[in-house]
Image (tube, rainbow, N blue to C red):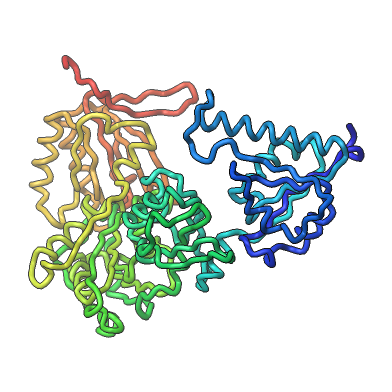
Amino acid sequence: MSEQQTGRLYGVGLGPGDPSLMTVRAVEVIAAADVIAYHSARHGRSIARSIAERHLRPDHLEERLVYPVTTETTDHPGGYRGAMEEFYADAAARLAAHLDAGRTVAVLAEGDPLFYGSYMHMHKRLADRYPTEVVPGVTSVSAAAARLGTPLVEGEEVLTVLPGTLPEEELTARLATADAAAVMKLGRTFPTVRRALERSGRLADARYVERATMNAERTAPLAEVDPESVPYFSLAVLPSRVDAPRGDGGETPYRDGGETPRCDGGDARHGDRADAPSGDHMDAPGGASSRRAGEVVVVGLGPAGPLWLTPEARGELAAAEDLVGYTTYLDRVPVRPGQRRHASDNKVEAVRAEFALDLARRGRRVAVVSSGDPGVFAMATAVLEAACEDPYREVPVRIVPGMTAAHAAAARVGAPLGHDYAVISLSDRLKPWEVIAERLRAATAADLVLALYNPGSRSRVWQVGKARELLLEHRAPDTPVVLGRDIGGPGERVRIVRLADLDPAQVDMRTILLVGSSQTRTVRRGDGTDIVWTPRRYPEA
């Protein structure tokens, strides 16, 4: 049948509920249509029809598409999904009969037809067979933000839209990372959504909107809503963070310069001191200490870039009022309006830790940033050491883990850490070389794979060569060594060499070394790539 002989299909967005928020185009399409189709529950009432009712004509043919089930409980042999697939197929066939007869069909949809709407199931089954137009409508998310009277997203913020039907763990992770968010499909999912908001630390910011723009509209802080009172046509909103009180903004430098840390934090001189930031930045505006308790969260950024950042870490960075850290690492954290950034030299870990704890004592929510995992040669120890002394014993401190440099480098070449391994820093800034040498001998004698952090820098050039000599006392010359430089960053380079061929000149302060055990293998695969792996089973096991 040619296109000229068939009717035209319209998906008509009606907006959030107030008939006056329908678009002019929606009204025109309804007025000109031969058939008006709309979904309804078994009781026969249709919210979509009630919104468009004033524009319906007595001679309109009405197709009421009645859902067979409204919950996932059904005796259909295909279960809930099977029942719904059968319903959509039948509904599409009914509309196709009208279209084949040359009638124009308008399928009504609350909000926008292609935004969590039932119309999309008709669209997917019919749009490739008939001329089709989708008339967009005002979404419930936009209506909710308007009724709350607060910006939803500003500047470079990202809006996350989630269905409340997601598993609680998934909701929690996504809410923790979101700048702003809207959670749809509440109703019976409300308790799960509320727990996810609470677990992600966002409950206090969450707003509840029910039937936005309709007669029975209700808004409230979400934490105050009775779960038994929540209908399906409601949503949770996390508005823009831009207006959240965070202080006066700005950036406070310590001194700059010094040796750049490697991998998971490097060999910062824990005992060094530096000038503290100016006092005006240390005071929490508005007497914050009298309003609430502060805290320090030590956040692992991973080895490089946002792809290596965990959802929990991303959420903590977004929620912080103050960011404290080494300048290079702070530069990896997106700038947010209202947050205060306190940058420092990498050799002042003790000062940095005490400064963060002082801010928290004044009621600030502080994130101390650390490369890789904060507990691996990085800031977690420095913060905890200070937090165990007066006057910081009562300051809450949490550690948020991150991807370690060792694991990131290992993943690039296969599984060299597949069996027992040891992690050793080659820096002799915080421990004597004799201690390092003793540990290297012990670990190699035990046939452990080694992850060697901080192998060298501009001021430390001989440690790699000396370590190679010690390792060759117990390892074969052809033992594979992985050199991972700037893993995840723009300068990433990964090489595999023999232990005997390890050249100290190829190792800098941004490199980590993974030294295999006697069982570690290097294999060239069919595509020409070399992989390194250590078997999980040890000989004679």
Q: Residue at x 46, y 52 (%)?
A: 186
On the question of residue 371 being in view, the answer is yes
On screen, residue 151 above or below 31: below
Left or right of 187 on screen, residue 268: left
- Quadrant location of the N terminus in the rendered image: top right
Q: Which residue is drawn at 71% across and 35% down?
A: 92
State the image coordinates of residue 124 (x, y, percent, origin top left). 69, 38
Q: Nearer the viewer, residue 460 or 191?
A: 191
State the residue at coordinates (62%, 61%).
17
Report the front residue among 250 and 192.
Answer: 192
x and y, in percent, of residue 19 in the image: 68, 64
Look at the image and tell me whether residue 173 can be seen: no
Q: Is residue 264 left or right of residue 471?
A: right
Residue occupying the point 34% across, 42% down: 408
* Residue 57 location, quadrant: bottom right
The image shows residue 408, relative to residue 227, as above or below, that is: above
* Front-lying residue, 348 or 35: 35
Residue 204: where, in percent of width, then height? 35, 65
